Each structure stands twice: as C-alpha cells, then as structure tokens.
Amino acid sequence: MNWEKFATNIFWHETLHFFCAVILFILFFVLYNDYYLSLVTFVFSLAIDSDHYLESLIFYKFNLIKIIKDKRNCWLKTGKMTILLHSWELIFILTVLGKYFNLVPLFLSLSFALFFHLFLDIFVYSLSCNMPIYNYSFFYRLWLKFDFVTLYNNGKKKQLTKEEIAEKYGKK
C-alpha cells in the first residue's frame, strides 16, 4: 500500500483520523454508555490537528487566503515545527489531570484519543518517510529548537536541505 498519499494529502490523512475518531466514539460509548463523553472523545481526536493550523494562523497573521494557498507549507517557510498537541508528554499530563480532578473517564478518553492519533501519525509517517517515534516528543523537539529540517531528516539515510524538501513536495 502507498502510505505516502496519507502523509502528503490532507484529505486522506484527515479521513484516517476521522475513522479512528469514530472507533474511539464507539469504544467509549460501549465502555461508559455516555454519549457526551464519546462525543468529546471524537471531537478531541480530530481537534488534535488544529495545532498545524494554529501555526499557519500565527505565521500568516490570520490571513485565511494565504493559509489556504499554503497547503501546510508553513514549516518550510518558518523553519520551525512546534505542533504542541502532537506530544507524548501530553498523554501523561492528561492522565495526571484526570486523577487530580477526579475526572478519570474524561481525561482517560482524551489520553486515548491523543495516543491513537499519535500512533496513526507515526504509523503513516514512519512508512512513508521513515519518521522516528521520538519526533513526537515535545522535549525532543524543544531540544532541537523545533528545527524543521533536522526533525524531517531524523532517521533518514540521505539528509535533505530545506530546498530539497520543498522540491520533493512540489512547493517552493
């Protein structure tokens, strides 16, 4: 199977996340018989990718026309990849908050949604462009100063320049 289309085409990528969110909705509805908890899990599972769009919103100063034309090319232009919600550490934080606030089912559902979202991303990106699992650590990205080229080249035999990455994806 050609997994690159799921990594480079936003429609197919978000479709995978949608089906994963549906499965989580069903799972948490069966476990807790709670429609609202299941709905929150579903919405959060999809909303995790909002950090991609938030970076573009900030970079383009909320100019939606530029964001639409950009097609997720913001990282190449800024040279940074923060994606704050795509972090293993957040799963731990959500779990601790659930225990602390005595809202275990809610925070457990959010943790599961994040885990499966990250797992799906890692599966797709490791198969399509050999991205390692530790790229999803906030502290690791911070240590690398969120440098997009360094993060993109992790685990690859051939190290690409920013220009070569842009050319590979047909964006300059």
Image (cartoon, helix red, strand yellow):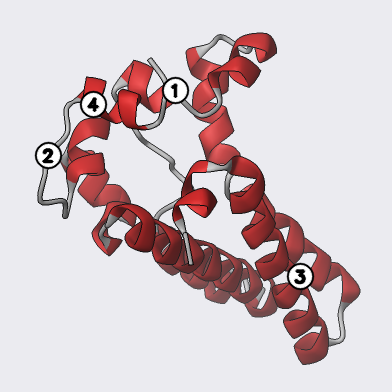
Q: Which residue is drawn at 61% across and 70% down?
A: 107
C-alpha gap between disc 2 and disc 4: 9 Å
* Quadrant in which the C terminus is drawn: top left
The answer to which of 116 and 39 lies nearer the viewer is 116
Disc on the earlier residue, 2 or 4: 2
C-alpha gap between disc 3 and disc 2: 37 Å
130 over 53 or under it: above or below: below
- Circle 4 or circle 1, nearest the eye: 4
Quarter residue 74 falls in = top left
Q: Residue at x 28, y 30 (%)?
A: 165
Residue 22 is marked as 3
C-alpha gap between disc 3 and disc 1: 29 Å
Residue 130 is marked as none
Residue 41: x percent and y percent?
A: 72, 66
C-alpha gap between disc 4 and disc 1: 16 Å
Residue under label 4, please give it.
Answer: 164
128 over 158 or under it: above or below: below
99 over 85 or under it: above or below: below
C-alpha gap between disc 2 and disc 1: 20 Å
Do the numbered discs 2 and 1 sit on residues whose CB atoms are within 8 Å? no
146 over 117 or under it: above or below: above
Disc on the earlier residue, 3 or 2: 3
Residue 30: x percent and y percent?
A: 81, 89
The answer to which of 97 and 55 lies nearer the viewer is 55
Amino acid found under the numbered disc labelled 1: Cys
Residue under label 2, please give it.
Answer: 159
Amino acid found under the numbered disc labelled 3: Val
Indicate the secondary structure of the residue bearing disc 1: helix
Do the numbered discs 2 and 4 sit on residues whose CB atoms are within 8 Å? no
Disc on the earlier residue, 4 or 1: 1
Amino acid found under the numbered disc labelled 4: Glu
